[in-house]
Image (cartoon, rainbow, N blue to C red):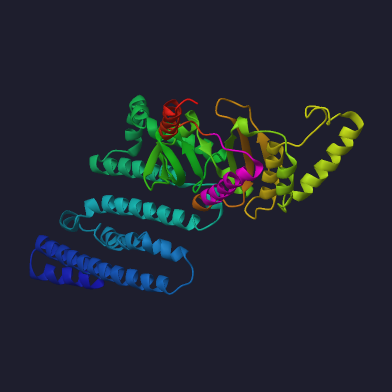
Amino acid sequence: MQLNERFVAWAQQLSSEQTAQYVGQFVHLLSVAVLAWIAAVTRTVFVRIVDRIADHTKTHWDDALVNRRVFHWLAHLAPGLVIYAFARRTRLARRSSGYGRSPKSMLVVGALSLDAALNAGHDIYRTFGVSKRIPIYAYVQVVKLVITIAALIVTISLIIDKSPLLLLSGLGAATAILLLVFKDTILGLVAGIQLVAQDMIRPGDWIEMSKYGADGDVEEITLNVVKIRNFDKTVTTIPTYALISDAFRNWRGMQESGGRRIKRALSIDINTIGFLEDETFERLAGIKKLRPYLEERREEIKKYNEEYGDADASPANGRRMTNIGAFRAYCQAYLREHPKIDPDMTFLVRQLAPSSAGLPIEIYVFSREQRWVQYEGIQADIFDHLFAVLPLFDLRAYQEPSGLDISHAGESLRLALERPQA
């Protein structure tokens, strides 16, 4: 500044006062431009140094700041601050250097810096375990929206040279229009608060919502939509407020329980159900898992019949073992020894009401394995085995007649009619 004043004094001696003033302003403008250029170069060097430091640190929060370009946007403020600080005294600099636009540009850069800082903060928050229980991305979006609106209002006020309060008072009259425009945003905000407060959904939860064709894991909860990665690798987006107004199924309880339910039945042909004959009993007694049950039941039934029954007169008198009862006992013994079935959770092998499709024997147990592929494999292995052992109990699975069965029956009938009569 002293050099500039000496130059002005020297110029006043050589020319008129007005010429000296313009020459001084030109020198001042040139010095401001040089300082701004130095600030820009310094900004680039500073950003590169920060990036290298972040690459060599063990912490992750600085990586988030670099990846979201927080320092990049903050460094952009340096040239603007230099112009704003040094050019305000020179009228020519105001006209030539864009000083009048400098506050607006710094306001935009400041808003972008805050936006990047919020994104970085959210990335850092997601590294903590609590982020899976309490997602905050929707609230980050709300803050970013408020910052954007505030920056827009202040920028417009600078352009029209009016107070921001004047614009805010005008917005009050347009509240109804704003509510209509931001209806989905407001509904999403309210729904997001309820979802988090009631712990209804978290990122990573497996949810099912048939109305929207969604069946998969929650990837992201935003202000307006919830993104779900379906098991067929497609992505379904559901309005956030729809999770409050409509019903959906969350499988988190199953995942936290440590087991996954197996609930399936096999239908037994009722015509094959009967009392357990001695030959069948001896054959089944060779099954290690079933032998304790058979011996215990035989002693129990023998004592009962000696006291109350008359089994020799009729099979209907007294008590007798049945092949279907022995099969149910075998199912229980087999499943209790299965390494992938949790016996401490609900464990049930039961008969359902008989129907035209036979007598259903339902298996209601919980698998220790929750992963879909492994779970389906365990379930298939169990029923493969149970179907295969049915003939040992003189039982047969029920199956509705197929076209081939009808063809065989027709062929048998034709042969019977063609056979010569004796």
Which of these two is toward me, 365 or 129? Answer: 365
- Is residue 344 visible to the viewer in this orientation of the structure? no
Q: Is residue 132 left or right of residue 45?
A: right
Q: Position of residue 231 (x, y in %)?
A: 43, 46
Which of these two is toward me, 190 or 335? Answer: 335
Q: Is residue 416 above or below residue 66?
A: above
* Residue drawn at x 62%, y 27% as measured from the top left: 354
Which quadrant does the N terminus fall into?
A: bottom left
Q: How many marks?
A: 0
Q: Is residue 162 above or below residue 410?
A: below
The stretch of residues the image draws in magenta is: 375-398
* Residue drawn at x 89%, y 29% as measured from the top left: 308
Residue that sits furthest to the left in the current view: 15
Q: Main secondary structure of the magenta part?
A: helix
Which of these two is toward me, 240 or 258? Answer: 258
Q: Position of residue 160 (x, y in %)?
A: 24, 39
* Residue drawn at x 42%, y 38% as measured from the top left: 214
Is-magenta flag for residue 281?
Answer: no
Is-magenta flag for residue 376?
Answer: yes
Q: Position of residue 175 (x, y in %)?
A: 36, 27
Q: Is residue 95 above or below residue 413?
A: below
Location of residue 35 by image quarter? bottom left
- Is residue 154 visible to the viewer in this orientation of the structure? yes
Q: Position of residue 295 (x, y in %)?
A: 81, 46
Q: Is residue 68 left or right of residue 103?
A: right
Which of these two is toward me, 90 or 329? Answer: 329
* Residue drawn at x 46%, y 35% as measured from the top left: 209
Residue that sits furthest to the right in the current view: 307
